[in-house]
Amino acid sequence: MAKVKRVCFSYRELPEGGEVSAQPKISDEVAVKQSQHLIFLIHGFNVNKLEAENAYDGFHKLQDIPPDEGRYGIGRTFVEVYWPGDASFASFLFYQRSIQRAIKTAEQLADYLVTNIGSHTQIDIVAHSMGCRLATELLRALKDKPVIDRIVFMAGAIPTFMLDQGNPSRRLRPSYNKVLRDKSLNLYSTTDRVLTWLFPAGESLDPREGFLPTALGHDKWIDYTVPINFEQQQNPGAGHSDYWGQDKANIEQHCAKNAAQEVQKFLQFPSAGSRTISNRPLKENVIIEARKNGANRKIINRDIPAYVS
């Protein structure tokens, strides 16, 4: 039975609310530094520590089928990032502060990776909601250091215009081109009400974030400058929180399972399916049957003339 390596990587000062800590609290730094393949999981906006734990547990539960087999984690260390994208009080106006905390966390994480992780280590990211913004800001903070291999964006709370290739390019596009070594996958849903209504309104509070922008995770990004290494896949019927795999209603859990399968294929996890061999009737050995029948063949007696010297 394989045991999945899970490391807590926290930039939280408090379980709920609080500021971004200057140094991460790491549950097993040796495992992080020795791993040849790191997969960072990054939660989104308005998620406290307990809710993030439940989200990450849901992710592993959906990948680990059959239970306790853990094959998907072979050769990989999962780094579960915790950052203060929430407040101890509910406020719509906190949204912009959360963006700034995502940017600050990304800068802190970039410093850690450059200082402690070698370029030979493969680094993949699975991010959700504003965690996707944190992931792209991480690329920006890394500047021209290509150390991130693949990214999965789930319900990405990123204005698509920030990834446009222009002259000059928008905020997040140059670093995407330079730092990402392989490719990315965008999982989106047109039925995501948070990205339909709340995201544009929250972004519009700051002119730098654009006026009523379209979220990356709301619809397929169609533009002639879309990167060739940017794959997109719809998650039909998914709401904003239907990706990690926390205990949900059947339809929501179905969406989370679909997301899990897409992540599995994109990041090339070993198959999580059962390896039970089905009971199939075996055909009789044709060769043996032929030999058996051959034993009953009638031998014809032929008169052979005697040899005369």
Image (tube, rainbow, N blue to C red):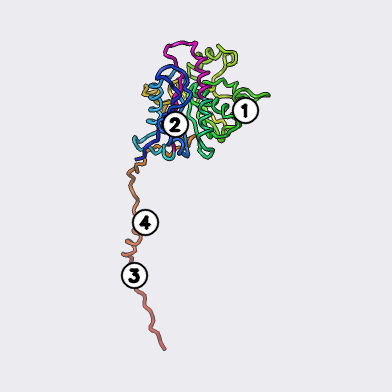
CB within 8 Å, label 2 to label 1: no
**Whole-number angstrom distance, CA of label 1 to CA of label 3:** 86 Å
**Whole-number angstrom distance, CA of label 3 to CA of label 2:** 77 Å
What is the crowding at mark 1: few (fewer than 14 residues within 10 Å), some, or many (at least 20)? some
Give SS at disc 4: helix
Quarter of the rendering occupied by the C terminus: bottom left
Reading the chain from its start, which is encountered first: label 1 or label 3? 1
**Whole-number angstrom distance, CA of label 2 to CA of label 1:** 26 Å
Q: Which residue is mark 2?
A: 79
Reading the chain from its start, which is encountered first: label 4 or label 3? 4
Reading the chain from its start, which is encountered first: label 2 or label 1? 2
**Whole-number angstrom distance, CA of label 4 to CA of label 2:** 55 Å
Residue 228 visible in rendering = no
**Number of numbered discs:** 4
Query: Outermost residue, front direction?
Result: 22
Q: Which residue is mark 4?
A: 286
Quarter of the rendering occupied by the N terminus: top left
Residue 272 drawn at (x, y percent):
40, 37
Position of 189 with respect to 58 (left or right) is: right
CB within 8 Å, label 3 to label 2: no
Name the disc covering residue 299, or none. 3
Q: Nearer the viewer, mark 4 or mark 2?
A: 2
Query: Outermost residue, right direction?
Result: 167
Q: Is residue 16 magenta?
A: no
Q: Nearer the viewer, mark 3 or mark 2?
A: 2
Q: Residue at x 62, y 28 (%)?
A: 174
Q: Nearer the viewer, mark 4 or mark 3?
A: 4
Q: Which residue is mark 1?
A: 174
- Magenta stretch, residue numbers: 76-105
Looking at this view, is 60 or 193 the one in front?
60
| Residue type, label 1 | Pro
